[in-house]
Image (tube, rainbow, N blue to C red):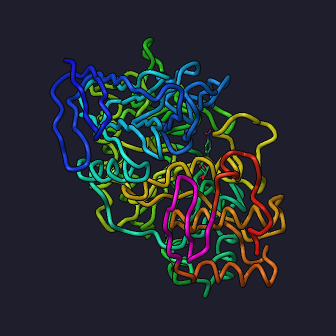
Amino acid sequence: MLHTFTFGDLRIPANLAGEPTATSTGFVVPAGPVALLHPFGDTGFYRHGWNSWSPSGWTTTDGETIGIKNSPDRLLTADDAVNETPHLHSGSGVGAIAGPDGTVLLIGTLGLGNPRVGADRNTIWARSETDEAEWFVTFGPEQQAFADYAAILSERLGRRSQRAGRVWSSWYSYYEGIDEELVARTVADLTGYPFDVFQLDDGWEPIVGDWTAGPDFPSGMQATAGRIAEAGFRPGLWLAPMIALPDSTIARERPDLLVQDDAGRPLATGYNWNSHYYSLDTTQREVQDHLREVFERVTGWGFSYLKLDFMYAGAVTGRRHQDVHRETAYRDAISFIRETVGDDVYLLGCGVPMIPSIGVFDGARVGPDVGPFWDNAERVGDPSGVGAWNSIVDSVNRVWLKDVYEVDPDAVYFRSARNLLDPVERRLLQDVAAILEFKSTSDPVVWLHESERAELRQYLTETSTVEQTGRFTFRLDGREVDLTAVVAGESRSDTSYIG
Ligand code: 9PG
């Protein structure tokens, strides 16, 4: 049906599936395709990526599209590959175009079904794979419009209240090279540092898919969790429960439990660890039994903070036993995991589809991995590649998600050893994490100089007050932090940054 939205003097003709309903902050539009004619001509477009690692940010309707280009394997892992439109502007879940004087016209989904929003110089449109979720449409000052969208999203999908606190993670120092003695030493060195969580990352398990203690943890995972708890930290553990490498027990013995291709063979649903991997078909009863067993096991060991990684793989296109939409299969699976672990376990999502994770996860990663370098020389032009700059850009463009769950921009560094980031770049990462209000690091104490240890303690202890004053400008403890030039890639910041 034809409809005209009125926002003050602005009139926006629209083609909708049904009559919209006014709310105090905008309009709720019935499920189905949406097309709005806007009068702004070529203008800014906010593109939002599907999962934690997916590129998000502002471009212009006559500029380059934002996304992962020329790399099907990476696209499959780090965005919604089947809906990607490299030659026209579109993104997942929500999109906005810039109007005059800092206003935006925003369309966002209120549910599941792989919703997509795109724009050009005349139109902003929305559609999804299933036409099951309503849309929210609003016009107003940019930060207000995103805040209003986040508020209605939480109303619909929920909002958890647990906070992670300050996290130490093993990934950005030891990577997969962890063993029980190294962990014990690292924990002992950290005793007395104001961390809340000590989180073991990838490397403890024998292979991705088999969630048992690997050969480097001969005393078992309960022993390691116990050591962490004795040192005064909450034990945290990484796992990727939706996926299995081809050599894992489950993939070898029960290929029938995996998401399949049209020929009935296990479907490759992403790439990492120099291999493709498969997804568990979570619509099967036996897979749910397996998940219950895995989560009862790891919480039984004493881990109460879980970083669940590569979760998007539970929401990829493929053949499942039950004929439910892929994002519904995903949300059912994470809801099942939440029921199994209870409300007291902190669930940090990583590689999660952002919108379908709201209300179930306590926190979510909102950008690609950081690395001890500014830009990724091997993957120039891939905004989902590892590196400090890519991580900052994506995270800062997703700060509005703070209102739906905790947002994790990934670890920050204090170490100058084994690090190509200079003091200005390290400080930038620290400020972004303070702005997002999620502080984590992977620096072992023994890698830090005396002054760096003091900086780490100071950073963890100070309670920051954060205020957003513009798209990329913030007031952090009374200090102005302007990330505009950094996000634009024009400058790593001026040197006044380090004071
Ligand atoms: C452990 C790591 C760390 C890290 C996670 C995740 O797009 N990708 O192909 C892609 C691969 C790996 C990856 C991120 C993105 O790293 O983000 O913090 O836990 O797994 O293996």
Q: Nearer the viewer, residue 286 or 22?
A: 22
The x, y position of residue 105, in whole percent, is 39, 37
Left/right of residue 168 with respect to residue 84 in the rendered view: right
- Compared to residue 40, the image places residue 243 above or below, namely below
The x, y position of residue 228, in whole percent, is 55, 76
Quarter of the figure with the N terminus = top left
- Compared to residue 52, the image places residue 280 above or below, namely above
Q: Is residue 475 magenta?
A: yes
Q: Residue at x 38, y 58 (%)?
A: 403
The x, y position of residue 48, in whole percent, is 48, 38
- Compared to residue 355, the image places residue 218 above or below, namely below
Residue 86 visible: yes
Q: Nearer the viewer, residue 197 or 453?
A: 453
Q: Is residue 204 magenta?
A: no
Q: Nearer the viewer, residue 177 or 64?
A: 64
Quarter of the figure with the C terminus = bottom right
- Compared to residue 324, the image places residue 368 above or below, namely below
Q: Residue furthest bottom?
A: 192
Residue 285 visible: no
Q: Nearer the viewer, residue 132 or 260?
A: 132
Question: For residue 115, which quarter of the picture?
Answer: top left
Question: For residue 220, which quarter of the picture?
Answer: bottom right
Q: Say how many tags the image has.
A: 0
The x, y position of residue 208, in whole percent, is 56, 44
Q: Residue at x 40, y 28 (%)?
A: 116
Q: The magenta stretch spans which residues?
A: 464-481
Question: For residue 329, which quarter of the picture?
Answer: top left
Q: Residue at x 52, y 50 (%)?
A: 366
Q: Residue furthest front?
A: 9
